[in-house]
Amino acid sequence: MTKNCTFEPCKMNIQELADDINKNHPEYVGAKLISTYLIQDAERWERGKKACFKEDLKKACSGEGLMEFGKHFAYIKFYIDKSKEIRPLVVGKTNYERPDVIFDKIDDGRCARRFLCENNLEWHMTEILVVPARNRAEAYKIEGELKKTYGLLSS
């Protein structure tokens, strides 16, 4: 069965989205852009870089003012549109111990990958937006709220 993938992409760019979340959603304490340590269009992390990414995720989830937060977080991945603007596309949730933030374009029926393939677009692979959560349930809740508020697709 084919999923209905009709949606209207968010018009904000990467910085506008980060600013909007921090300005209009104070409940998302610690939301920020972080580097993935990936080189754009790389098939995998260079030696030692995934460990750096995981360490930065841990810091993002347990930094100053976040002592009550756990290892889980919601995240937003971005794509590069036809005019080379970086725009939000996908919201997901994971944890910093085993983050499953993947940038493949295999059209497996998921809407984001189909959108990228059908429109000949690419992931923006060098950074994601992280929203720390107190636990897995809260990460799911934040994921749903971000999806609804910004018109994003599920990971």
Image: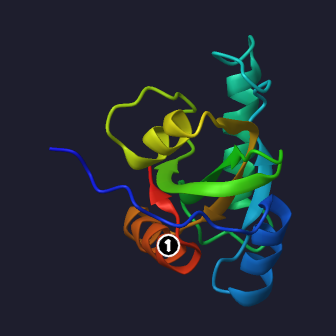
**Residue 47 x %, y %:** 74, 10
In the rendered view, would you say 79 is above or below 91? Answer: above
- Which residue corresponds to the image point at 51% horizontal and 33% vertical from the top-left? 117
- On the question of residue 99 being in view, the answer is no
Assign the N terminus to one quadrant of the image.
Answer: top left
Q: Is residue 109 above or below residue 32?
A: above
SS assignment at label 1:
helix
Q: Which residue is mark 1?
A: 142
Q: Nearer the viewer, residue 137 or 103?
A: 103
Residue 48 at what x, y percent from top left?
75, 16
Res 19 seen here = yes
Picture colour scheme = rainbow
- Kindly give the residue lying farthest to the left in the view shown: 1
Q: Nearer the viewer, residue 80 or 61?
A: 80
| x and y percentages locating residue 84 in the rendered image | 83, 44
- Relative height, residue 83 to residue 31 (above, below): above
Nearer to me, 120 or 152: 120
Kind of residue indicated by mark 1: Ile
From the viewer's perspective, tell me whether residue 5 is left or right of residue 11.
Answer: left
Q: Residue at x 70, y 76 (%)?
A: 29
User: How many neighbours does mark 1 have within 10 angstroms: few (below 14), some (14-19), or many (20 or more)?
Assistant: many
Left or right: 69 as drawn, with respect to 48: left
From the viewer's perspective, is 37 left or right of 119?
right
**Snapshot quadrant of residue 79:** top right
- Who's the residue at 40% across and 61% down the image? 6
Q: Residue at x 33, y 32 (%)?
A: 108
**Residue 18 found in image quarter:** bottom right
Q: What x and y, as percent, mark residue 67?
A: 67, 69
Which of these two is toward me, 117 or 142? 117
